[in-house]
Image: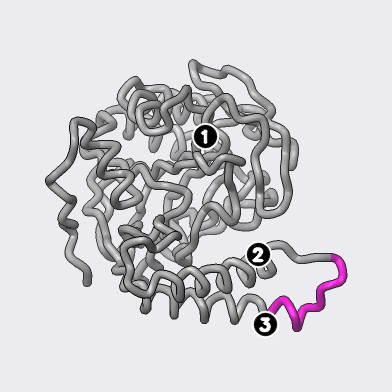
Amino acid sequence: MQNSAYPINQNLNDNPILSAYQAQGFYHAKNLIPKTVCERVISGFNNDIKPYNGLLLRQRSVIKEKHKFTKNGFMENALLDVHRKDLFESSKFPKECLQLFKLPAVTSLIRHILDAEPLLVQSMYFESSKGTPEHFDKFFLDAKTNTMLGIWIALEDIEERNGRFYVYPGSHNHHFNTHPNSAELRSLFQHYETYNRAAVCKTHDETDVSRLHSVIECKRSLKKLIRQASWKKFYPLMKAGDAIIFSGDILHGSDVPSSEHSSRSSLTGHFMRSTQTNIRYGEFVEPINRSFNEGVWIHQSNRY
């Protein structure tokens, strides 16, 4: 098990939040969200969404599905775009999510890092999960000028057995300027990037066999990259109301919960500068569909 106290560089300039974010690729904001706000979001899910028997948009499949529950009764197929009232019959739950995202503590922190007014382009709600393999968001969701960032908010205390969120500090530096073998690492990263793109973006003339090869080679090269770059997995100790702000360039994921796990209620948002005109999903580029909702600038994708 990794240490839960990562030693952030203490020799920061007069902008410690931005310095920590730029140096490590993430910033751990403790007690960012009042517990009463976290409880309202969970209550909205329990009262309005969990009993619902219809189809809702899901994070992993990106299609509408019914709830899938663990043996302990927790929803394991996370919801996608919970900031959009048009995707839910009940508007109470999306409103509670937006009320959280619009908190001055949240918007000011994201604005501070982006150096611009933030635009919420994607959101997710987890009660439980099957775990998320380590990945870089930039290959799935990105802005043209690489200003995308994510925020992972713990709505309750997250225990080890429940599938903890993790990051690889420093893995956002894809130029590898601090490594003696930087040229070799850049070449390896380009190799990984090529096969990752092939694995994610299937073309019409691609066979299942060739795509499987891309997936295997992608995983193999990522493991080699982690080892040779000496990236170490780090688990922030997440209490209710804590948040991790992380770069779209950083390697991150979450563990598979244990068989006896409880809930790990959490809310994720992805933000970019509101001046951006397009958003990229893998190789697909979509114009921003911008609106102002509950005090938050949001994007409503036309893909769904």
Say whether residue 88 is left or right of residue 118: right
In magenta, the rendered stretch is 204-212
Residue 105 is labelled as: none
Dot 1 and dot 3 residues touching (CB under 8 Å) = no
Residue drawn 75% across the image and 80% down it: 210
Q: Earlier in the sequence, mark 1 or mark 2?
A: 2
In the image, residue 254 above or below residue 225: above
Q: Earlier in the sequence, mark 1 or mark 3?
A: 3
Residue 272 is labelled as: 1
Q: Give the position of the C terminus as an image quadrant.
A: top right
SS assignment at label 2: helix
Q: Which residue corresponds to mark 3?
A: 213
x, y percent for residue 52: 58, 41
Q: Local crowd at mark 3 within 10 Å, few (<14), some, or many (≥20)?
A: some
* Mark 2 and mark 3: Cα distance apart in space: 12 Å
* Mark 1 and mark 3: Cα distance apart in space: 33 Å
Q: Does the rendering let one see residue 130?
A: no
In the image, residue 203 above or below residue 58: below
Q: Give the position of the N terminus as an image quadrant.
A: bottom left
Q: Amino acid at mark 1?
A: Met
Q: Which residue corresponds to mark 2?
A: 197
* Mark 1 and mark 2: Cα distance apart in space: 22 Å
Q: Amino acid at mark 2?
A: Arg
> Is 28 included in the stretch rendered in magenta?
no
